[in-house]
Image (spheres, grey):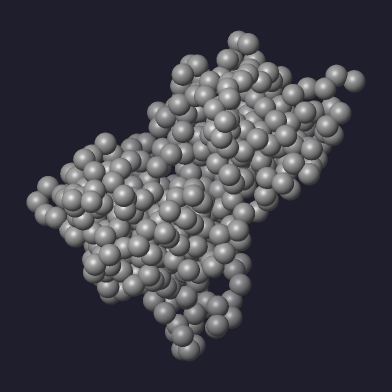
């Protein structure tokens, strides 16, 4: 029996899910698995870092699903603190460097998985690398930030640059550490993944929590003191004092290795794969996780979405395919949830500008409701916005801002989008009801009813 070698670049969600699934299907006598990871950690939840920093999760190791030792116990040759620096596609080998010893060596492969993840956006501005300026992509980043918070001098002022998911989550974490928090946002409203009218609700709630949000603020420099440590963040027309700066600007696909050897990349810089997660044009190379672009089932275009949910699914599918099984990843509808303190934020499908970008005509419907029956104790407000295609009534997107379990209601819309449902069809959905959980008409269905009316009016206009 001939033993094949599978080489995996990247030891987090996609890479180690692929390794684990491949090992379930083929033993070490059939498939040798070698995985390279440049950090000390594997299979951890990067999405959980803001909650660890904020103190909701008290133990860093709680974010680790499976340690390097556990992977090795399953006959996976996992090499941590080892960085792959080059891929030789024609020679079917990769060059790796042991970060501890500096030793470089080549390892051949029969099959290759690229799971290099994403890198935080870090603008090339003065002072961006100063002590006290932190990204939050890895567990090491989180540890460094916690240590910086403990050392922060003076008035304990934190500036968060960016108001997307990571930005608002880190603003909450800074607030819990007793910092005065300012969020600098280059957009019209926080949470650019929402339409501005829904982002305004987030802005108002953040103000109510004591977080200062400055919109249309373009950061121009990080100012430092005589000791070289951060002292303020400068924008075009102001300066904001800071003892700690957290970058929440977003991420982009880490495809440096892939780009160097000419592997196909999409418009957002992510690797392009087929439905089996095989890199287009390369029979023995697969890719998954935050370094790839995936099909948006609503827009019909590829997009880059950095989420552990997708990465783990990609890994499962890749692991099955490299080990002789079969699986496909059809695409996404763009579902995401977040929170800042008790405010919950959710979206799925297209925003208004997304629909316009792909040439769709649409109507919108926005409603205010509550998460429980209005008479039930603890009922709190919730706003739901829905987009539906002009005339056809096909659901295009939903955004929700509220409290009391508001965010997970977006899953109703995610299923409806995946199924290609119309808003009229949605009004007949048989959803669970009891006063502690929902009004008689669930807020999502109320929005669907209003969207049906908007579609009908548009059709007669």
Query: Left or right: where does residue 324 sit relative to residue 367?
Result: right
Residue in front for this viewpoint, 59 or 196:
59
Q: Is residue 401 above or below residue 333?
A: below
Dividing the picture into quarters, in which one does residue 126 lie? top left
Residue in front for this viewpoint, 224 or 254:
224
Residue in front for this viewpoint, 20 or 323:
20
Q: Locate the N terminus and report the quarter of the image it occupies.
A: top right
Query: Left or right: where does residue 131 sit relative to residue 166?
Result: left
Residue 429: give x, y in percent of width and height.
Answer: 58, 63
Q: Residue furthest left?
A: 237
Q: Residue furthest right?
A: 1
Q: Is residue 76 above or below residue 170?
A: above
Give me the residue at 31% from left, 69% from top. 179
Residue 368: give x, y in percent of width and height.
Answer: 36, 72
Give me the residue at 40% from left, 42% from top. 120
Residue 216 visible, this angle: no
Residue in front for this viewpoint, 72 or 316:
72
Residue 253: give x, y in percent of width and height.
Answer: 45, 35
Give me the residue at 51% from left, 51% from top. 139
Give me the residue at 48% from left, 44% from top. 306
Residue 324: give x, y in percent of width and height.
Answer: 78, 28
């Amino acid at each position: 029996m001939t033993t094949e070698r599978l080489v995996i670049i990247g030891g987090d969600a996609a890479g180690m899910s692929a390794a684990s699934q491949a090992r379930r299907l083929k033993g070490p006598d059939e498939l040798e698995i070698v995985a390279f990871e440049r950090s000390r950690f594997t299979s951890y939840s990067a999405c959980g870092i803001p909650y660890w920093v904020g103190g909701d999760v008290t133990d860093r190791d709680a974010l680790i699903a499976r340690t390097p030792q556990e992977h090795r116990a399953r006959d996976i040759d996992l090499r941590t603190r080892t960085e792959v620096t080059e891929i030789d596609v024609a020679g079917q080998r990769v060059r790796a460097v042991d970060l501890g010893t500096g030793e470089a060596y080549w390892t051949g492969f029969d099959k290759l998985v690229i799971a290099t993840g994403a890198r935080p956006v870090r603008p090339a501005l003065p002072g961006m690398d100063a002590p006290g300026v932190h990204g939050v992509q890895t567990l090491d980043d989180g540890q460094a930030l916690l240590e910086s918070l403990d050392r922060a001098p003076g008035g304990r002022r934190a500036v968060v640059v960016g108001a997307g998911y990571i930005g608002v989550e880190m603003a909450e974490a800074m607030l819990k550490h007793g910092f005065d928090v300012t969020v600098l946002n280059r957009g019209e409203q926080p949470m650019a993944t929402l339409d501005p009218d829904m982002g305004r609700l987030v802005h108002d709630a953040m103000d109510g929590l004591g977080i200062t949000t400055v919109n249309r603020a373009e950061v121009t420099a990080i100012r430092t003191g005589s000791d070289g440590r951060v002292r303020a963040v400068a924008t075009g027309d102001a300066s904001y004092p800071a003892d700690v700066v957290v970058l929440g600007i977003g991420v982009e696909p880490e495809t440096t290795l892939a780009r160097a050897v000419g592997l196909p990349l999409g418009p957002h810089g992510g690797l392009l794969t087929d439905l089996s997660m095989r890199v287009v044009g390369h029979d023995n190379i697969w890719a998954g996780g935050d370094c790839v672009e995936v099909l948006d089932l609503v827009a019909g275009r590829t997009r880059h979405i950095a989420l552990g949910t997708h990465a783990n699914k990609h890994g499962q599918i890749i692991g099955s395919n490299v080990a002789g099984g079969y699986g496909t990843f059809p695409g996404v509808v763009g579902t995401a949830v977040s929170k800042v303190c008790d405010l919950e934020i959710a979206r799925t499908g297209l925003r208004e500008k997304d629909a316009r970008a792909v040439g769709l005509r649409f109507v919108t419907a926005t409603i205010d409701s509550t998460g429980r029956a209005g008479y039930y104790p603890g009922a709190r407000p919730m706003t739901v916005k829905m987009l539906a295609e002009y005339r056809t009534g096909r659901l295009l997107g939903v955004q929700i801002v509220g409290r009391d379990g508001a965010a997970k209601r977006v899953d109703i819309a995610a299923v409806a989008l995946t199924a290609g449902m119309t808003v009229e069809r949605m009004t007949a959905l048989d959803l669970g009801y009891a006063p502690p959980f929902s009004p008689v008409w669930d807020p999502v269905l109320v929005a669907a009813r209003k969207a049906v009316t908007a579609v009908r009016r548009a059709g007669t206009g």
